[in-house]
Amino acid sequence: MNPKSATTALNLGICYLYQEKEDRALVHFKKAVQNDPKYAYAFFNLGSTYFDQGKYPLAIEALEKAIHLDPTYIASYEICAMAHLILNQKDKAEELYKKSEGFKRQARLKNVIG
């Protein structure tokens, strides 16, 4: 295993999540984004883990980076919106939900049209 591989760090973090060891997972998700600052899925996992821990401002920060890097990954919008809603930032939450719904409609149309 390459210790500088963002993919390796991400996969180790996911393994720790399956073992319900969120703090250990976070260490590896942080390594993944440090090793590859353009790895949207690593930022998503970092943000969703922070969300699960109730660390909503940190979750929003990581998820907004994930959205910036991959604006088509719907789950980033949805979890980020939930974090904003919990923090009573309703306008921002609504904006993110609307964007995620727009992507869902586009995907359904694409599936129908082919």
Image (spheres, grey):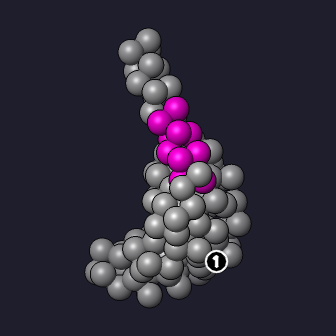
Highlighted range, magenta: 92-102
Toward the top, the furthest residue is: 113
- Quarter of the figure that contains the C terminus: top left
Residue 18, visible in the rendered structure:
yes
**112 or 51: nearer the viewer:** 51
Residue 96, visible in the rendered structure:
no
Examine the rendered structure and indicate whether residue 91 appears above or below residue 25. above
- Dot 1 lies on which element? loop
Whether residue 96 is in magenta: the answer is yes
At a point 50% along the width and 79% down the height, the residue shown is 55
At a point 58% along the width and 66% down the height, the residue shown is 60
**9 or 63: nearer the viewer:** 63
Q: Which residue is mark 1?
A: 4
Examine the rendered structure and indicate whether residue 15 appears above or below residue 69. below
Toward the left, the furthest residue is: 19
Whether residue 114 is in magenta: the answer is no
**In this rendering, would 106 be left or right of 111?**
right
Examine the rendered structure and indicate whether residue 105 appears above or below residue 3. above
At a point 57% along the width and 61% down the height, the residue shown is 89
Examine the rendered structure and indicate whether residue 51 appears above or below residue 82. below
Q: Position of residue 27 (x, y in %)?
A: 53, 85
Q: Position of residue 54 (x, y in %)?
A: 44, 78
**54 or 106: nearer the viewer:** 54
State which quadrant residue 20 falls in. bottom left
Q: Position of residue 51 (x, y in %)?
A: 46, 71
Name the amino acid, label 1: Lys
At a point 30% along the width and 74% down the height, the residue shown is 18
What kind of secondary structure does the magenta stretch mostly adopt?
helix
